[in-house]
Amino acid sequence: MTHLVPCSWLSGMSSAAQQDFALAFLGILFEGAPFILLGTLASGFIEVYLPKGVMDRFLPKNPIAAVFMAGLMGAILPVCECAVVPVIRRLVKKGLPVSCALTYMLAAPIVNPITALSTWKAFEGPHAWVMMFSRLILGYALAVGVGLIVSRCKPAFILKAGVIPTEDQEIKASDCCEAGKCCQHEPSPQGDRVVAAFRGTLKDFVDVGVYFTIGVTLTALFNTGIAPGVEWLDGLAKSEALSPVALMVLAFILSLCSTSDAFIAASLDKFSWGAKLAFLTFGPMLDLKLLFLYQTVLRKWFIALMAIGLVLSIWIASMLWQKLLFP
């Protein structure tokens, strides 16, 4: 009989280290799983109940104006970065332009009232309003910038093949309609539609949950590894150029929720305000768990290009912001 044996790295850990890893893993998992469930639940009902193209009615016809409007949708539909990815998958299939979808995906975790309130609360004091509005403005500007660039690209170059509805799927969805009039078929019973919505929810939850669990595992390993001491951060905090990069790396590793990361940033007293702004902006747009979640929607090469663009843009913006407001 074959016996299951623990991995060598796990068996080599002390019981205390194993407990630390288990607590870190469960803590991150339980923090993010409800938002994953909420997002996939919304995506399942969007698939069944949201008519194709309905999002276009709420966006301007001008594609550039639509991108700018999509960056503000988070104020109406506030979601964190964990929940927004499965929703985007369904909205794209329902006809939402890819440029607007990516703009909303990047902006919604930052440009929403919950994140704004938590940021203001975390930085209580004379700089609370400055940090809150700076985070909202920079997050919105970056998301819109990505959306404007994507608007000039074909969806096939950005999205995975399974996310874009094929021509056969579009015909199947509209094969009972001609000249704007649908055939007189009996509508599906309400119970069947609810069941179909929950089936879509289960499918998306499993699909996204696999990548999320991998990201949580790696994040817990990094967290337990750096928890005993972070002296290396003290040296980087004194560098004007390296401190924003150091906190972006830290935000990537910690993979905190956008509604709570401000409290961590506010506690990093040795870092400049510009470095803290980089931490608050980069984390909700790209972290370790999002790296896996994005792979359910986006092509890997596009994720890499987007990551490079975000790092450079936030690095430059945070240093300029530091010189202008805190010379």
Image (tube, helix red, strand yellow):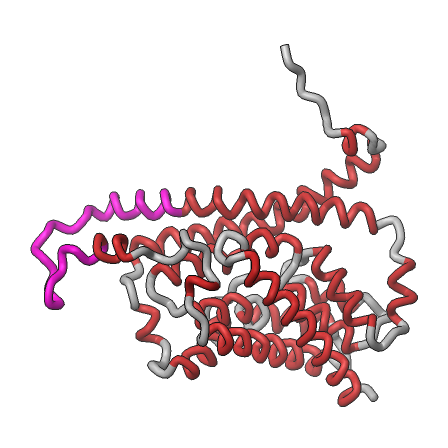
Is residue 106 placed above or below 42 in the rendered structure? Answer: below
Image point 74% across, 75% down: which residue? 124
Image point 49% across, 78% down: which residue? 148
326 with respect to 49 (left or right): right
In front of the other: 315 or 85: 315
Is residue 207 placed above or below 57 in the rendered structure? Answer: above
Image point 11% across, 50% down: which residue? 186
In front of the other: 303 or 121: 303
> Is 50 a magenta residue?
no
Residue extending farthest to the left is 184
Q: Residue 51: percent from the left, percent from the top? A: 27, 62
Q: Quadrant of residue 248?
A: bottom right
Q: Residue 74: percent from the left, percent from the top? A: 50, 70
Q: Residue 104: percent from the left, percent from the top? A: 49, 69
302 with respect to 42 (left or right): right
Q: Quadrant of the N terminus?
A: top right
Segment colored magenta? 173-200
> Is 192 a magenta residue?
yes
Q: Quadrant of the C terminus?
A: bottom right
